[in-house]
């Protein structure tokens, strides 16, 4: 049995590592600013120049000394990154005879899902033969919306300001080139790429659409108008039903929603039960697994604080392929027990599991510490009177008093020093008498006031500093000890 558990954990870790590597190599931003892959040359294989380590580039603007906390993905490595919002990932290289000290990285796997690629465009005929137009405010989404409204499947951007539309037949006869050649920034947004000179960057028009039905095994749902900011007063919905699978996993690659009133909801596609919701205050964890074969996603925004939005990678899974936690239900169909199911989802990440264990250890230690403080405080409060010293002798033991009596003496008796509510009090008793016999205060209450009497049982020193209530409480407490 233990070996079966170990085998299952190994399979689970392998699946997690494979998924993690796949996600690391993907880019969900047009310019690859989110790339965290392992490409460390300016071109695939051995044809490109090797990148310099980011912790060895202090003579340049971007290095680990300036960004020590891993900002922009920089660190003690030489992997390609895009820390300055350039058109694509790049890295520093050893300066050559032409004075070049950096280059773009050609990373075939670094592209947005929905981005088809970079193609040659001779113009006779154009790569995409449908409708076209130009704009000095062109962005990727402006072109996508233009072609989407006209019923085309693909949209292409070229030279920073030109937009073309077309269908699959156009792409089949086109020549694809390196993504590095589509390096022209969009006239309407400098952080996006809009093809190049004689090069057209082609996208699927479903990217950034406000609605859609997804039946493929896996895919990506983008917020409306992505990669541009989502619009005010958006009201969009998507349905996921990967055929042949009974569970759906959602992994949030990007979640940039800042307004608490802009809300993304995840519901069961059959019962419409709310499973989870996210907004500007409530951010999602990733990945999240829902044991249902159909999910409905909806997004609504108000007229304030628009942001980039989200990119959600989904995929269908078989319930038998993952360790699903059993939820209350009828046995044939797992059902949530509350309207907010965020805390009833799962993650495969080993790091997340470690974080969970660490959190429990922290919670346990904190709870134990607080409990110890409560116990100690209770006993200290209960024991407000503490005898700290006893002196017995045949000589006078004088103590000063701030009350009307200037001296308090213990004539051959027992002198007890008592700490009572942060006030030091001296108790004098008759020799041989128990220390809890009736006590007399310095004012003659409950006994004689002859200060030279051998039976001068008294409370003195700082006794008068106590309030009359505390004086009474002290005498009552000592009389019961």
Image (cartoon, grey):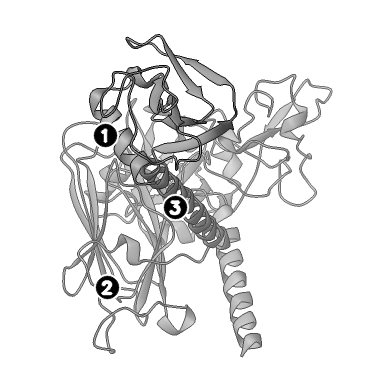
Q: Residues within 10 Å of mark 1 (few under 14, many from 20)?
A: some
- Estimate the x, y position of residue 442 in percent, counting from the top left: 34, 19
What SS does tag 3 mark? helix
Query: Residue 294: which numbered mark, if any?
Result: 2
Residue 459 higher or lower than 330, as above or below = above
User: In the rendered view, does 80 fall on the left or right side of 283?
Assistant: right
Query: Residue 367: which numbered mark, if any?
Result: 3
What SS does tag 2 mark? loop
Residue 129 appears anywhere in the view: no
Please give the residue where the numbered disc 1 appears in the rendered image: 306
Q: Residues within 10 Å of mark 3 (few under 14, many from 20)?
A: few
Residue 53 higher or lower than 294, as above or below = above
- Estimate the x, y position of residue 129 in percent, counting from the top left: 36, 50
Q: Quadrant of the N terminus?
A: bottom right
N-terminal of the pair, mark 3 or mark 2, is 2
Residue 137 appears anywhere in the view: yes
As measured in the structure, the alpha-carbon distance from the residue carrying label 2 to the one carrying label 1 is 29 Å
Dot in front, 1 or 3: 3
As measured in the structure, the alpha-carbon distance from the residue carrying label 1 to the one carrying label 3 is 41 Å
Q: Identify the residue at image location x=16%, y=68%.
A: 272
Q: Nearer the viewer, residue 372 or 457?
A: 457
């Amino acid at each position: 049995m233990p070996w079966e558990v170990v085998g299952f954990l190994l399979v689970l870790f392998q699946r997690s590592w494979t998924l993690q590597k796949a996600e690391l190599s993907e880019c969900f931003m047009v310019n690859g600013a989110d790339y965290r892959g392992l490409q460390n040359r300016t071109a695939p294989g051995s044809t490109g120049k090797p990148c310099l380590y980011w912790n060895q580039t202090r003579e340049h603007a971007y290095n680990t000394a300036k960004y020590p906390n891993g900002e922009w993905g920089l660190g003690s490595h030489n992997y390609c990154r895009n820390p300055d919002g350039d058109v694509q990932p790049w890295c520093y290289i050893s300066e050559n005879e032409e004075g070049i000290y950096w280059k773009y990285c050609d990373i075939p796997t670094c592209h947005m899902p929905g981005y088809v690629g970079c193609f040659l465009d001779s113009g006779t005929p154009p790569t995409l033969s449908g409708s076209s137009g130009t704009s000095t405010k062109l962005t990727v989404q402006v072109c996508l919306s233009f072609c989407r409204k006209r019923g085309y499947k693909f949209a292409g951007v070229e030279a920073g300001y030109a937009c073309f539309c077309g269908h699959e037949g156009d792409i089949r006869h086109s020549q694809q080139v390196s993504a590095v050649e589509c390096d022209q920034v969009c006239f309407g947004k400098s952080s996006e790429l809009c093809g190049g000179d004689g090069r057209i960057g082609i996208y699927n028009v479903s990217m950034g659409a406000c609605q859609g039905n997804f039946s493929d095994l896996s895919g990506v749902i983008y917020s409306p108008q992505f990669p541009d900011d989502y619009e005010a007063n958006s009201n969009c919905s998507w349905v996921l039903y990967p055929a042949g699978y009974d569970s759906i996993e959602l992994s949030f690659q990007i979640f940039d929603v800042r307004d608490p009133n802009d809300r993304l909801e995840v519901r069961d596609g059959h019962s419409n039960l709310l499973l989870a919701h996210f907004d500007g205050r409530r951010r999602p964890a990733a990945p999240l697994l829902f044991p249902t074969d159909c999910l409905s996603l909806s997004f609504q925004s108000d007229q304030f604080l628009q942001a980039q939005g989200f990119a959600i990678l989904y995929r269908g899974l078989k319930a038998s392929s993952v360790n699903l936690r059993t939820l209350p239900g009828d046995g044939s169909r797992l059902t949530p027990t509350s309207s907010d199911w965020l805390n009833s989802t799962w993650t495969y990440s080993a790091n997340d599991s470690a974080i969970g264990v660490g959190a429990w250890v922290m919670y346990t230690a904190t709870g134990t510490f607080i409990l110890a403080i409560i116990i100690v405080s209770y006993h200290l409060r209960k024991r407000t009177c503490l005898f700290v010293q006893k002196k017995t002798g045949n000589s006078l033991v004088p103590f000063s008093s701030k009350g009307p009596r200037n001296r308090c003496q213990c004539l051959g008796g027992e002198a007890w020093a008592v700490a009572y509510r942060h006030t030091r009090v001296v108790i004098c008793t008759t020799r041989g008498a128990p220390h809890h016999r009736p006590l007399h205060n310095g004012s003659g209450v409950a006994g004689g006031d002859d200060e030279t009497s051998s039976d001068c049982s008294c409370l003195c020193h700082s006794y008068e500093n106590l309030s009359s209530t505390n004086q009474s409480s002290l005498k009552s407490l000592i009389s019961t000890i």
